[in-house]
Amino acid sequence: MNALLYFIFKVYIKIGLFFYSKKINILGKENIPKKGAILFTANHPNALIDPLLIATNTTRKTYFLVRAAIFKKKIVANFLNLLGMMPIYRIRDGVKQLSKNEEIFNNCQELLKSNESLLIFPEGGHSKKRTIRPISKGFTRIVYRTLDKYPDLKIYVIPVGITYQNSSKYPSEVTVAFGKPIIANDFYNTNDLNSSVKSLKNQVSNQLKKLTVYIEDDENYNTIISKLNNAKTDFTAINNVNLNIKNEDFSIKISSSKTRNLPLFYLIVVNSFFPYLIWKLIHKKIDEIEFIDTFRFGLGMVLFPLFYFLQGWTIYLFFNFKIALLYIIASFLLVLIHTKTSNTKGSN
């Protein structure tokens, strides 16, 4: 039953992401082994949208390690568990909570032993900055503890770069790039664990710097990102952008246009007035900018379709089924046209 529900939610979320994103570019999908234990290690610019993008673009069921704070409400925790998400506790969650990680790590070991796939964000948190922050050793602990227990198990570590044109605006474009598999066994030396940890961390970090737009997080960061924004750079063209950064070439321009088809946008707002009003009220209360997209997408997946169907039902009561069906189709079509035709280039 859980497998069926997972499949249904996966399909629904994939459709939702199609309506929500102007374009989703998937690179390196051929690098994902069809069988075997996999640990995806991804950068984390956009809260819960990141794991959803990875899960809906792999054929394997993927389990995620995500921040424990979102598991506080039981109904939410049950839903997240259904999607394969597991809480990881940090010091900010309370020192006493850290002991719960032991059970989570044990679960991860057994999942890898069963040749399942896991996803972890080794930077330890989310950030919109176009850089790769220092990699924590948490994921190496999972890998090497698993190899301690199951030395004959082959574990693939696959870095994943996620790059948004603008992660806090709708609509946006995104590139998900799967890197070359790293065979963790090749780096595990039981006689020198510190060296093993460092080597695997470096392998992951070096790949991530090529799989997403990477700017050194130093005193020049703000200057470089400003120049790229002013050039209306297509950040989803990862290789081109990284080459421009390396060569200090910020001259490429993309013809600018209006960011929205305003008549179409206002028509959608009128047709979706109550869900849109709820979003505007919630938006003001979101403290972390990385969560804006998550809340907007969640509302878009629930409130907007529900509202359209309720309005369709009202039309059916006053007119007939055919007119109601045409209204519902037209409502979704308007959103899709707006998403796919809006210009996404610009500052972020």
Image (spheres, rainbow, N blue to C red):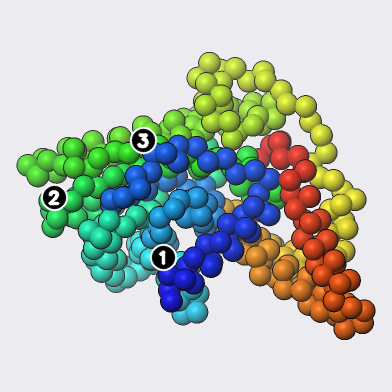
Point out the image quarter for the N terminus: bottom left
Residue 51 seen from this side: no
Residue at (83%, 61%) from the top-left corner?
A: 330
Question: Could you say which is closer to the camera, residue 220 or residue 169?
Answer: 169
Q: Which residue is mark 2?
A: 152
Q: Is residue 23 above or below residue 18?
A: above
Residue 184 lies in quadrant: top left
Residue 201: % across, % down: 29, 40
Q: Is residue 194 left or right of residue 116?
A: left
In space, the residues marked 1 and 2 are separated at their CA atoms by: 26 Å
Q: Which mark is residue 180?
A: 3
* Vertical comparison of 108 with 225: above or below: below
Please, is residue 207 above or below residue 337 in the view? above
Q: CA distance from mark 1 to mark 3?
A: 24 Å
Neighbours of disc 3 within 10 Å: few (<14), some (14-19), many (20+): some
Crowdedness of circle 1 by 10 Å Cα count: few (<14), some, many (20+)? some
The x, y position of residue 264, in whole percent, is 86, 52
| Amino acid type indicated by mark 1 | Gly
Residue for badge 1: 84
> Extreme front residue here?
322
Specify whether 165 is left or right of 133.
Answer: right
Q: Tag 2: residue type?
A: Asp
Residue under the point 34% across and 44% down: 33
In the picture, the quarter occupied by the C terminus is top right
Q: Neighbour class for label 2 at 10 Å: few (<14), some, many (≥20)?
A: few
Mark earlier in primary sequence (2, 3): 2
